[in-house]
Amino acid sequence: MSSNELKILAVPGIPEILPGLDLGEIIAQSTRKANLEIDTGDIFVVAQKIVSKAEGQVVSLDTIEPSSTALRWAEFYDKDARIIEVVLKESKRLVRMERGLIISETAHGFICANAGVDASNTVPNQVSLLPKDPDESATRILRALEKEFAVKLAVIVSDTFGRPWREGQVNVALGVAGIA
């Protein structure tokens, strides 16, 4: 690939990710199986959701006892009080709670909807949390991929953030390794 060319390729064949799986190994195996050529300087962008799942950053809602705050908010906006409680626990600071949306600051310092708590693409009755240390997550994946392909690479752990009270989504690099 020339230096002025950009290619974006999906790595096919990534299976459903479960807690405890080695995500770096899975990505490397799927990349090899797809016969994708990996070169020095390539960047792997990995969805936060599969990183969180592999790291066990998931919560069964059956284990959550909602607080009175979560119960009131959930009833008023027709939400699941258990999810609201997880959002409140994952929030370092509540920036704004209005019109059924919770904008908060996470322990990482991210300002986002619901402290990054997400019920999409999880098993029923479960939510995912952001990785505890996204930079360390990216570093672990990077080490596995560089070992497998014997070239210098970079890894970005990415998540989609909405724009509160606006239309559209943006992707945010939560964690990085191998790149400034």
Image (cartoon, rainbow, N blue to C red):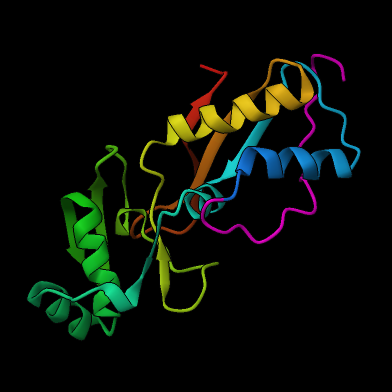
The answer to whether residue 115 shows anywhere in this view is: yes
- In reply to whether residue 15 is colored magenta, the answer given is yes
Vertical comparison of 174 with 112: above or below: above
Task: Say which residue appears at 19% left-offset and 76% top-offset.
Answer: 65
Task: Say which residue appears at 51% left-offset and 16% top-offset.
Answer: 180
Q: Quadrant of the N terminus?
A: top right
- Residue sticking out furthest to the left: 68
The magenta segment is 1-20
- In reply to whether residue 71 is colored magenta, the answer given is no
Locate residue 51, reporting x and y percent.
Answer: 52, 47
Task: Say which residue appears at 81% left-offset and 20% top-offset.
Answer: 39
Vertical comparison of 3 with 157: above or below: above
The answer to whether residue 9 shows anywhere in this view is: no
Task: Say which residue appears at 74% left-offset and 37% top-offset.
Answer: 28
Locate residue 11, reporting x and y percent.
Answer: 77, 45
Q: Is the magenta stretch mostly helix, strand or loop?
A: loop
Residue 99, image quadrant? bottom left
Locate residue 163, reporting x and y percent.
Answer: 39, 53
- Residue sticking out furthest to the front: 20
Locate residue 74, reporting x and y percent.
Answer: 22, 80
27 lies left or right of 180: right
> How many numbered marks are there?
0
Nearer the observer, 57 or 100? 57
84 lies left or right of 52: left
